[in-house]
Image (cartoon, rainbow, N blue to C red):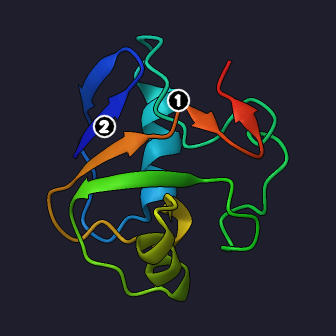
């Protein structure tokens, strides 16, 4: 999987069937390079629903990858919102973009 972020792009190995949110958090913890792959803003890294699809704080832009099959995905597509990474299963190669400035929750710094 390719992850685009403020500092460029990272390639992350992800096992098929992994939830995207979990893959991004694991990549963020394991890279050790200072590359921020987390889907969360500064505040929401601690204040989130834990991947249950309730808080909408783990949104990312899916540039290449699986189509939308969650009700929130259809709304996101219709209104241009990011998709919830906690509701996307990695089932094929994909490219995602980390949202750097979350309108409600602030920036990632």
Q: Quadrant of the C terminus?
A: top right
Classify 52 as above or below 59. below
Q: Residue at x 36, y 41 (%)?
A: 97
- Which of these two is toward me, 49 or 64? 64
Q: Residue at x 74, y 39 (%)?
A: 45
Q: Residue at x 42, y 20 (%)?
A: 6
Q: Quadrant of residue 57?
A: bottom right
Marker disc for residue 106 = none
Q: Residues within 10 Å of mark 2 (few under 14, many from 20)?
A: many
From the viewer's perspective, is 6 left or right of 79? left
- Which of these two is toward me, 63 or 88? 63
Spot occupied by residue 70 in the image (x, y as percentages of width and height): 47, 85
Spot occupied by residue 77 in the image (x, y as percentages of width and height): 41, 72
Spot occupied by residue 25 in the image (x, y as percentages of width and height): 53, 42
In this rendering, the label closer to the viewer, 1 or 2? 2
Classify 99 as above or below 73. above
From the viewer's perspective, is 52 left or right of 86? right
Spot occupied by residue 63 in the image (x, y as percentages of width and height): 25, 53
From the viewer's perspective, is 82 left or right of 102? left
Classify 71 as above or below 33. below
Q: Secondary structure at mark 1?
A: helix
Q: Which comes before the other along the chain, label 1 or label 2?
A: 2
Q: Quadrant of residue 91?
A: bottom left
Q: Residue at x 27, y 27 (%)?
A: 10
Marker disc for residue 29 = 1
Pointer 1 with pointer 2, Cβ within 8 A? no
Cα distance between the residues tagged 1 and 2: 14 Å
Query: Which residue lies under the disc numbered 2?
Result: 3
Classify 32 as above or below 72. above
- Which of these two is toward me, 22 or 44? 44
Q: Residues within 10 Å of mark 1 (few under 14, many from 20)?
A: some
Q: Secondary structure at mark 2?
A: strand
């Amino acid at each position: 999987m390719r992850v685009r972020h403020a500092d460029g792009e990272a390639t992350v190995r992800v096992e098929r069937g992994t939830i995207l949110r979990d893959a991004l958090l694991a990549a963020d913890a394991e890279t050790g390079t200072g590359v921020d792959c987390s889907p969360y803003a500064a505040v929401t890294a601690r204040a989130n629903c834990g991947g249950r699809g309730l808080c909408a704080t783990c949104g990312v832009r899916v540039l290449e990858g699986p189509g939308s099959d969650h009700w929130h995905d259809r709304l996101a597509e219709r209104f241009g919102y990011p998709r919830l990474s906690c509701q996307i299963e990695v089932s094929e190669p994909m490219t995602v973009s980390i949202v750097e400035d979350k309108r409600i929750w602030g920036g990632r710094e």
